[in-house]
Amino acid sequence: MLEFVLLTLLKILGFVLVFCIMLAAVLTWTERKMSAVIQDRIGPNRASILGIRAFGLFHPIADMLKSFVKEDFVPAGANRTLFFLAPAIALVPPLCAFAVVPFGPGDLVISNLDSGMLFVFAILGFGIYGTTLGGWASANNFAMLGSLRGAAQMISYEVSMGLNLVGIFLVFGSVSLTQIVAGQGELLWGWLPRWGIVVQPFGFLLFLAAAMAENKRAPFDLPEGESEIIGYFVEYSAMGFATFMLSEFVEVIVIACIAATLFFGGWQIPWVDPAGTAGGWITVAQVAFFAAKVLFLCWFQMLIRWTVPRFRYDQVMSLGWKVLLPLSLVNILATAVVLALIA
Amino acid sequence: MVKVKVVERPPADLVVQSWVPELWKGMKVTGRHFFRNVLTGKGIVTSQYPEARRPYPPRYRGKHRLMRREDGSVRCVACFMCSTACPADCIRIVAGERGDENEKYPVVFEVDFIKCVFCGMCEEACPCDAIRLDSGVHRVPAYTRADELSGKEDLLSLGTLSVSRQGGEFK
Amino acid sequence: MPTLTIDGREITVEPGTRIIEAADRLGIDIPRFCYHPGLPVAGNCRMCLVDTNKSPKPVAACWDPCQDGHVVTTNSPRVLEARRAVLEYILLHHPVDCPICDQAGECDLQDLYFAHDHRPSRHFFTKNHKAKQRALGPQIVYDAERCINCTRCIRVCDEIAKAPQLVQVQRGERTYIDVFPGTQLDHPYSMCTADVCPVGALTTRDFRFKCRAWLTHGIDTVCGECSRGCAIRADVYRNEVQRLVPRHDPEVNGYWACDAGRLAYHRFEAGRLEAARVAGAPAPYAQAVREAAEALPGAATGGVAVVLTPWMTCEDAAAVVAMVRSAAPGAVFAVGGAAAGQADSVLVKADKNPNHAGLRRVLEAAGVVLVPVDEVVARAPSLAALVVLGTEHAQADALAAALRQAPLSIAVAALDGPLAGAARIAFPGLSPYETDGTWVNEAGLSRRVRQALVPPAEARGYGTWASDLADRMGRPLAGGDAAAGKGA
């Protein structure tokens, strides 16, 4: 029992606290740097330690230090308890979602739940509270409007995000992420890895769109539309604001992890050790491959974020309800029909 | 009648509305910039300002300077042409007797850089090639209004000999 | 009465009139250097050449008298070519140092060059060098290189000042103007030579290098230095008088003004009383008015004396008299003023105050019986209140002593001095260049004085001061805005 607890703690430490949180910190740098190079600029490169600039990689540290020492301002009329709680509520659920993500073969998952993906949905649904409470507790009309938008947007896309993964569940016959990854180790016609993106390409596009909308990032960053309503965290400063930002980047990683797991074969290396029993360097390579997939998907999301301009709010809502939702249903129907015909 | 040219809206068919091909087009552009700049850095136009300064163009108008005569004294004859031409009224001159054949010189020649718009009208108006803005020295902001005034000595310190002949005499 | 045609327009003039005068009357411009309407004709510059039907060659319009049947052309090609040639000749040795020259901007040579010649010099030899910056007298500096030898200045000395001090020396291109050996140009009208100089040869030491002519704006006003009341123009730049130049007023001063009057503005450049004073301490104007308005009616029974100044305008005088009479009906008035000085036969009068005549008229109309200033001074200890306006009083020291003796003493003064220092309540007044109103000169001619400068923030004219005081006492002066606003 003690061994199990220690191992689990080690996995949490290694995967969630080291990999994910560090990656989230680096992503703040990546975001700025990527926008810069895409726009033919240089980007942040001034923070230095002992004169070493390291391409501005110290900026996340500087940002963090700045967030810690800045005044934590609470507006008059704010609900102080909820005001302080909201950033934490926003950050914790996405971190919990990592529990069921298998980052390697075998036991290299924090908690191998059978309900896997359902757990992720349930936990991510909590994220709405952070947004809503943050805006409401600020006692600011603009923050309130932002959180209203956030809540409506996240609820809307929650629906289609759940539905467009049903296709994957149908194909692999499970909601457990571990089993879905195992299922992706098989080969179609003897040569093509049966990755989610191969069997559910349409589902992947729908999932990506819904997930990015769920994450409230550009082009779906309506709850924080700087030019219109400023956003649900307009009253936050210092660490509260930093936590909201961090939660956003953690969600980027969550989406990347889930997309990698469901559509890109998780830790699977095509044609190599699909059962995940080889051990040794192969396992290390598989974990590294999973990390590479996550990094690629993070990069991909960033690229989208710096390519597409923002939607109008009515466009976001009609896209969610009138396009993604029916298409998800069509996807389920088509998948079911095809599966029935094959069977 | 004003001629109105009606421009067709770009077609918004199903392919466009599906977003995927359009998104792909956009990402090709951003991706191209991304890879080119990450791999070669050739597209980046930012200059690292305090360390790397862009050279001012040759016709850059910087701080004024007062040119000198062969004997090192100020070329200016205090004719007030510059202060008359100045649209910002930033030049203050007090004229005085030189006591030699050149007769007149500025006892006080002050440029108020808080008012100056660096238009170069003074330079153009000057009949003696005495005031120039080609110093290439950027105006340094000051903390007080008084510090924004640049006096004759300051302006002369940037000055050099002018090649043009004063008085335009035939020799 | 000869009738002639100039450029197709007919005019009838008295016999002896010169063509240039007839043309001036018609508004036809004939360029000229040596001709000046206030001076005898010399006819030496040849700039005013015109074609007539009575002579084979162009004639000088300033010299030729009008004849009956004269047909004059001022713009024929021959005339234009003649002007151009004359200008080229005049400019032959001119140094063209316009940037240094004070005349630039109001220079006839500049203007006519641009109008009639406007081409580069064909002269390629070394130019003649002559004396520069030669002081001809205490006020005048002469630059022989710029001089075109029109002799206007010589004629001013000879004919206007009756002081023949200038003379032409040398001949031909070496000619220049000079004073006779051992003398200098020091008659009281010497600065008029610089006025009439069409180029920058003669400049006044006062205005030399001070300001460029085009930067100033001129305000037509009247000189107050004597009861002649010469018409002058105050040239102002940045709210400072840069110089005073005479205006043409045929009934008063012709084209001239004396040096003393033109330098008088320096008196008001420093030593101004900037703010009101109550009991020696600076106070806001409104507070000083309040104190004076509260004290003055109370002093009415004990005897009030007011010393007026002949420098105040007629309008100011009427307002002051009305105010004082309504506050203290039994008040006695005296008129002070600067002491009489020297007069001359040209312009300068012995009375060194500008508005004695006007003040007399206003006081007569108001039925005021004046007492001498000496009597006011003598009665000062028994007075309840003494008001002294202005600082230009010959008995300033006696008045200052009287102010100290009176229980309530009020002074209105543009300049800080013994009077402002002696009064319990001192109000800052206006200089003549900040005043608007009417002066009447010794000949009984009323002339408008115009405000040329913006006064110090707290300073008020006598009339405004009287009106403010009257308003404060609850007895607004009749007429004007106050009556219109309150009577309705």
Image (cartoon, helix red, strand yellow):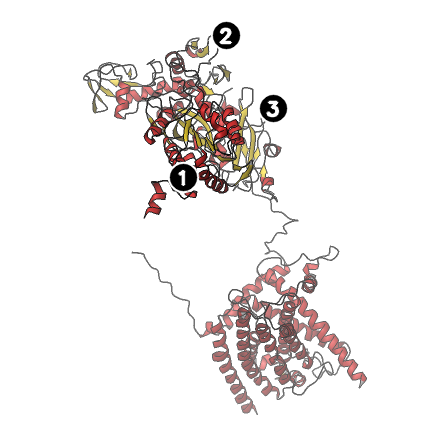
- Can you tell which of label 2 and label 1 is closer to the viewer? 1
C258 to B135, vertically: above or below:
above
Residue wearing tag 3: B71
Q: Going by the image, does B152 lie left or right of C476?
A: right
Same chain under badges 1 and 3? The reply is: no
- Whether pointer 2 and pointer 3 mark residues with C-beta atoms closer than 8 Å, the reply is no
Q: Going by the image, does C206 lie left or right of A119?
A: left
What's the mark number on residue C467? Answer: 1
Measure the alpha-carbon separation of dots 2 and 1: 57 Å
Q: Position of residue A214 (x, y in %)?
A: 57, 76
Question: The residue tagged with tag 3: helix, strand or loop?
Answer: loop
| C385 or C70, nearer to the observer | C385
- Which quadrant of the rendered structure holds the C terminus of chain A? bottom right
A322 to A77, vertically: above or below:
below
Q: Position of residue B77 (x, y in %)?
A: 53, 27
Question: The residue tagged with tag 2: helix, strand or loop?
Answer: loop
Residue at 57% from the left image edge and 72% from the top image edge? A135
Spot the residue most to the top: C181
Looking at the rendered structure, the kind of residue marked 3 is: Asp
Q: Position of residue A31 (x, y in %)?
A: 62, 65
Residue at 34% from the left image edge and 30% from the top image edge? C367
Measure the alpha-carbon separation of dots 1 and 3: 63 Å
What's the mark number on residue C182? Answer: 2
Q: Is residue A202 visible?
A: no
Q: Going by the image, does A263 lie left or right of C479?
A: right
Residue A196, quarter of picture: bottom right
Residue at 40% from the left image edge and 66% from the top image edge? B9
| A6 or C237, nearer to the observer | C237
- Whether pointer 1 and pointer 3 mark residues with C-beta atoms closer than 8 Å, the reply is no
Looking at the rendered structure, the kind of residue marked 2 is: Gly
| C339 or A200, nearer to the observer | C339
Dot 2 or dot 1: first in sequence order is 2
